[in-house]
């Protein structure tokens, strides 16, 4: 960090406002960096500031670490291997001061030579509750590296992959604005309103409307999912074997839980290649039950499971462990030889003494030698130009201690001036890293009593103290620009033991008071931007004074302190650090104490603390803790019901997340009734009809375009109510489908009456599904498109994944060619993952699977995709998408010949009996069971088991009720009709004939309404009907039309099936030659599709006939199509 970069960042602190283009940003940054380098690089012939009589530890070799350095370089070599390079973990452990960080830094130069980036972050004991501190520092440095490199291709890739979500990553990488090309406007969407206190909070926190989380948006695990997904996307672009990233994170034993979550997420992502993670921690502070230990075990376990799922076909993850021992006497002697410019024989006796006093701890050795010099026990003889010492004198004047911090404190008391000793604890209270300007401000206010010196004189004194600390190697600094007495430099403690020693300079009780006073000064005197940057530091310092009897001056102090904890909690919540946020909210509640509900001054603040605490505990999965805060609010009779709506919304969201749909529906209906929205529990069918008619009347004179111009909803409570109705949609669809239409109609009526908000797109999408079920497919399709367009216009991107899934799984197939849904389904997955909506992102991929099967996508490619996505579902613990993904996957494997029985869904992906039993044991899984039986129906028909196929038809008779408007519906109808004709042919039973004709009439009706996906199906069924009645010419004409239609639509699977049916029909009437031609075409198309088992079954069934064919059937070069015809000259 240096002043030029800070100044430049201030120009870009709101990248949305800046008018700098990419072409201006990067060169300017290069210019500033070049200036910095020119000021800091030593000139040729310049003398070092170190003189002969000073101990120089800056560039000494790492003695006794040859094996460990080799291990690190091997890890980097594996990481940069283009064939096997994946992710590498090196865990360096050892006691404090043993040289872990220095060892890890040996990777810096090799990484640079490999064309990669080496970045460092460190956790701080004093700020251990602040989330992501080490990762933030490391990634800030990484962004600087990328910007300075001028790699426009890389920067463009980052922008394209992450887009506007780069702003979200600014929480973790504050300087990411320098990578933004296009300027965004800071806009507050019209459906968001802000109360006075929220305005005040934003002013205090220095936040804009752009990066504020609206109060009407409930934060959930989606926030954490979003952060993790974006970070993985970022690293997938940044890292590669050709451009490795070495991420050194120090003092992992102090990492907060959110940082450990992020670490685990990054390291188990098989798509990341070229990442070397080096983690340093104190082994004596990390037991087997420490959170870090459990995360490491989880990472290794996930890697093993992932390899098993993917048969080892993925980027590997290797873990190496290095334990750093203390130095031996021999190693200490070699160190002394270098530092004292002596020889091994002369320093041997001194090495023995140093090892005795320090046990070989590297940091202790260095500090001990400094102590000897400062006390005159290690002296430089100017006459002899060599160092001298007296071993006996050293032994008698020093003592053995295992607490190096106490040794350093003694040295501080002995060697530092009074002013410096007084300032050091203040610096240590600010954390491992701090700004000199911050120290100046605090000192000027902390000692602002007698006015003995001017501010300028104080600054000079502070500067002198800081320089003394740098000279004594207590502090290090960014020496980038030190113009005169400019003290805006960044400083940091050389080691955490030095920082601890600085705190030891003050008695414990006095330290608490000092910390509290520093926190008060920061809150009172820092500007908005600075307090936002240091909010966690300030609040943590204040919180250390809780319970101290002499620090609080009354109610006002309590109110401010509690409110600061609210702000810190909200900031942590936005960072998805929910454990930390819950702690801050609970601290705020504790500060208010029993007066929280009794005093009107506190009530509003206390309500916010409780609702936010409930939300954070829900996100943590601590449902018991969440219920405590919820019940506390709900039982308050002095709190207005509207002020309880948010708490109810959190409770409802948590119940739905637990799969408790009955209580979710019960609480939702109760809240809605209180808000004047009645959801009937009796005479539901009558209510459906009434509300359908009412909704149609409300929409009668409004076009979809008119609806986009509805006013925006302003009332925050009504927006929360919209969210509750939206959640009720999901719950009723799963658990009470009879109520689903009523909720949809009520939702649309609510939106039309009160205006648009970010939940409105879901209302119109749900209404579209209902219209499709009712047969009004054109209107349904239009309202479905309206829902998607509103997502964009309302910036409701958190709904994009879900609504994309709903549109393409339940709506688009009624009017648009099914193949057009493939790309949007993948886009829906990406949108959902970016929004943190993992479940709907994965469900969008499930829709992609089924659509790909319906339209005949190559099964070999599709199976590979399924394998990857199912593994991701397992990794994210997404049970519902998993259950919806494994049966299509096994369907593909059966067609490819990778199962014992092609009509039974048992193999690598699933076991039919086990999965059916599992689904039947759990409530609300009829939808999945019926879908599984539909694909089983298709398999049974393909492989000629028509009795099994008809059994599946019977068992899915309620498919339209359990899966209304589902994309499998048209395939179910198609194969139901084909099965009915097959049964009619074999049994000559009239009931099968009637059923087949009934299905054909249904398909005819749908085609007349505009369903393009049924055109070839209708021709096929009409051909089957004509064939059944022996009408050859009509049958052949219809078969030809079906072949043409399926070919134009690119449905290689259905083209194969139609040709098979033509061949079978011609064979039945004795036209073997023509039959063999069509059977060969079918055989080739099945192979093109990848249905190897089906192709082999067809060939086995008609082996002799297909061998004797006089037709050729070859792949057209480069087209993937077929060119069929009779061979020339009888060849």
Image (cartoon, helix red, strand yellow):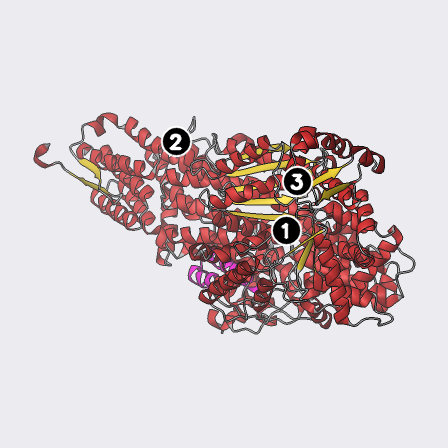
- The structure residue drawn at horizontal position 64% and vertical position 39%, both measured from the top left corner, is 341
| Residue 35, percent from left and from top | 53, 63
Secondary structure at badge 2 equals loop
Other residues around mark 3 within 10 Å, as few (<14) / some (14–19) / many (≥20) = some
- Please name whichever residue, 956 or 269, is drawn nearer the observer in this view of the structure: 269
On screen, residue 619 versus residue 974, left or right, reads right
Please say whether residue 781 is one of the residues in the magenta stretch. yes
| Residue 808, percent from left and from top | 45, 53
Disc number placed over residue 837 in the picture, else none: none
Reading the image, the residue beneath label 3 is 339
- The structure residue drawn at horizontal position 65% and vertical position 53%, both measured from the top left corner, is 576
- Please name whichever residue, 650 or 1111, is drawn nearer the observer in this view of the structure: 650
Instruction: Determine contact: label 2, label 3, CB under 8 Å.
Output: no
Find the distance from the CA under tag 3 to the CA under tag 1.
Answer: 54 Å
410 is higher (above) or lower (below) than 751: above
| Residue 1089 in sight from this viewpoint | yes
Which residue sits furthest left?
A: 1129
Q: Earlier in the sequence, mark 3 or mark 1?
A: 1
Reading the image, the residue beneath label 1 is 221
Reading the image, the residue beneath label 2 is 945
Secondary structure at badge 1 equals helix
Q: Nearer the viewer, mark 2 or mark 1?
A: 1
Find the distance from the CA under tag 2 to the CA under tag 1.
Answer: 46 Å
Q: Which residues are magenta?
A: 758-785
Q: In the picture, which quadrant includes the N terminus?
A: bottom right
Instruction: Determine contact: label 3, label 1, CB under 8 Å.
Output: no
Magenta region, main secondary structure? helix
Please say whether residue 285 is one of the residues in the magenta stretch. no
């Amino acid at each position: 960090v240096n002043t030029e970069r800070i100044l430049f960042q201030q120009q870009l602190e709101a990248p949305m406002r800046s008018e700098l283009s990419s072409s201006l940003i990067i060169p300017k940054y290069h210019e500033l960096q070049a200036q910095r380098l020119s000021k800091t690089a030593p000139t040729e012939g310049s003398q070092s500031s170190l003189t002969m009589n000073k101990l120089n530890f800056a560039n000494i070799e790492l003695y006794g670490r040859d094996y460990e350095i080799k291990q690190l370089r091997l890890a980097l070599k594996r990481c940069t291997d283009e064939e096997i390079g994946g992710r590498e973990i090196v865990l360096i452990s050892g006691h404090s001061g043993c040289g872990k960080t220095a060892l890890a830094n040996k990777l810096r130069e090799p990484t640079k030579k490999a064309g990669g980036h080496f970045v460092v972050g460190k956790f701080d004991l004093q700020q251990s509750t602040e989330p992501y501190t080490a990762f933030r520092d490391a990634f800030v440095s990484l962004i600087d590296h990328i910007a300075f490199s001028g790699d426009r291709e890389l920067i463009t890739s980052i922008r394209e992959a992450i887009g506007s979500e780069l702003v979200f990553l600014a929480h973790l990488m504050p300087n990411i604005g320098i990578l933004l090309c296009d300027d965004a406007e800071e806009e507050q969407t019209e459906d968001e309103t802000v109360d006075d206190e929220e305005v005040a909070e934003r002013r205090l926190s220095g936040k804009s409307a752009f990066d504020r989380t609206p109060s009407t948006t409930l934060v959930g695990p989606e926030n954490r999912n979003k952060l993790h997904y974006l970070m993985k996307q970022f690293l997938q672009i940044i890292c590669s074997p050709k451009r490795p990233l070495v991420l050194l994170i120090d003092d992992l034993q102090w990492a907060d839980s959110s940082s450990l979550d992020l670490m685990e997420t990054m390291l188990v992502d098989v798509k990341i290649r070229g990442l070397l993670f080096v983690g340093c921690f104190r082994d004596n502070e990390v037991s087997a039950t420490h959170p870090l230990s459990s995360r490491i075990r989880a990472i290794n376990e996930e890697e093993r499971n992932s390899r098993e799922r993917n048969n080892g076909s993925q980027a590997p993850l290797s873990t190496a462990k290095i334990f750093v021992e203390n130095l031996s006497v021999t190693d200490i002697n070699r160190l002394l030889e270098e530092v004292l410019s002596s020889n091994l024989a002369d320093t041997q006796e001194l090495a023995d003494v140093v090892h005795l006093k320090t046990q070989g701890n590297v940091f202790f050795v260095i500090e001990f030698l400094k102590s000897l010099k400062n006390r005159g026990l290690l002296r430089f003889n100017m006459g002899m130009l060599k160092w001298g010492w007296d071993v006996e004198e050293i032994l008698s004047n020093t003592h053995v201690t295992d607490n190096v911090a106490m040794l350093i404190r003694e040295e501080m008391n002995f060697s530092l001036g009074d002013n410096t000793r007084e300032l050091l604890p203040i610096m240590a209270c600010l954390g491992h890293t701090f700004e000199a300007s911050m120290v100046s401000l605090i000192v000027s206010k902390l000692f602002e009593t007698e006015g003995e010196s001017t501010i300028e004189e104080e600054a000079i004194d502070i500067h002198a103290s800081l320089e003394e600390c740098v000279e004594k190697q207590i502090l290090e600094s960014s020496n980038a620009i030190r113009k005169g007495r400019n003290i805006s430099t960044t400083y940091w403690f050389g080691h955490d033991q030095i920082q601890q020693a600085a705190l030891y300079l003050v008695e414990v009780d006095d330290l608490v008071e000092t910390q509290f006073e520093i926190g008060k000064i920061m809150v009172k005197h820092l500007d908005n931007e600075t307090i936002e940057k240091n909010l966690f530091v300030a609040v943590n310092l204040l919180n250390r004074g809780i319970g101290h009897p002499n620090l609080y001056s009354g109610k006002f102090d309590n109110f401010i302190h509690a409110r600061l904890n609210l702000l810190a909690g909200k900031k942590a919540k936005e960072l998805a650090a929910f454990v930390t946020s819950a702690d801050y909210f609970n601290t705020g509640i504790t500060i208010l104490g029993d007066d929280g509900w009794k005093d009107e001054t506190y009530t509003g603040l206390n309500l916010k603390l409780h609702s936010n605490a409930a939300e954070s505990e829900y996100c943590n999965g601590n449902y018991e803790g969440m219920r405590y805060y919820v019940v506390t609010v709900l039982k308050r009779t002095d709190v207005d019901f509207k002020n309880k709506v948010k708490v109810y919304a959190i409770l409802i969201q948590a119940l739905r997340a637990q799969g408790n749909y009955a209580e979710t529906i019960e609480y939702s209906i109760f809240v809605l009734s209180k808000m004047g929205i009645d959801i009937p529990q009796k005479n539901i069918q009558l209510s459906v009809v009434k509300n359908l008619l009412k909704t149609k009347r409300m929409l009668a004179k409004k076009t979809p375009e008119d609806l986009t111009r509805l006013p925006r909803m302003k009332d925050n409570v009504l927006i929360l109510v919209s969210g509750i109705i939206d959640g009720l949609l999901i719950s009723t669809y799963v658990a009470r489908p009879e109520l689903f239409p009523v909720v949809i109609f009520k939702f649309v009526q609510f939106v039309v009456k009160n205006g648009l908000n970010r939940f409105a797109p879901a209302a119109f999408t749900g209404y579209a599904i209902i219209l499709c079920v009712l047969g009004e497919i054109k209107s349904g399709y239009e309202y479905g498109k309206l829902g998607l367009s509103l997502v964009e216009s309302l910036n409701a991107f958190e709904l994009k994944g879900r609504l994309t899934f709903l549109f393409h799984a339940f709506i688009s197939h009624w009017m648009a060619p099914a193949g057009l849904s493939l790309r949007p389904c993948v886009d829906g997955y990406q949108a959902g993952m970016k929004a943190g909506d993992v479940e709907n992102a994965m469900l969008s991929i499930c829709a992609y699977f089924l659509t790909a099967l319906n339209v005949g996508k190559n099964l070999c490619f599709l199976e590979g995709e399924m394998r990857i996505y199912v593994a991701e579902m397992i990794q994210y613990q997404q049970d519902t998408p998993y259950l919806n993904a494994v049966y299509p996957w096994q369907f593909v494997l059966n067609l490819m010949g990778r199962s014992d029985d092609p009509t039974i869904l048992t193999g690598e992906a699933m076991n039919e009996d086990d999965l059916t039993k599992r689904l039947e044991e759990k409530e609300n899984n009829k939808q999945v069971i019926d879908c599984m039986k539909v694909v089983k129906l298709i398999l049974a028909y393909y492989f000629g088991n028509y009795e099994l196929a008809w059994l599946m038809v019977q068992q899915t008779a309620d498919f339209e009720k359990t899966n209304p408007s589902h994309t499998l519906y048209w395939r179910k109808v198609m194969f139901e009709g084909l099965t009915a004709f097959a049964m009619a042919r074999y049994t000559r039973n009239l009931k099968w004939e009637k059923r087949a004709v009934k299905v054909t009439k249904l398909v005819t009706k749908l085609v007349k309404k505009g369903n393009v996906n049924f055109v070839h199906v209708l021709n096929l069924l009409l051909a089957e009907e004509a064939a059944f009645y022996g009408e050859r010419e009509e049958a052949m004409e219809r078969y030809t039309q079906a072949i043409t239609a399926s070919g134009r639509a690119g449905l290689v699977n259905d083209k194969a099936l139609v040709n098979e049916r033509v061949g079978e029909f011609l064979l039945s009437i004795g036209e073997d030659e023509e039959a063999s031609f069509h059977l060969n075409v079918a055989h080739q198309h099945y192979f093109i599709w990848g249905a190897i088992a089906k192709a082999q079954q067809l060939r086995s069934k008609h082996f002799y006939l297909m061998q004797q064919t006089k037709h050729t059937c070859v792949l057209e070069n480069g087209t993937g199509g077929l060119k069929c015809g009779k061979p020339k000259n009888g060849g």
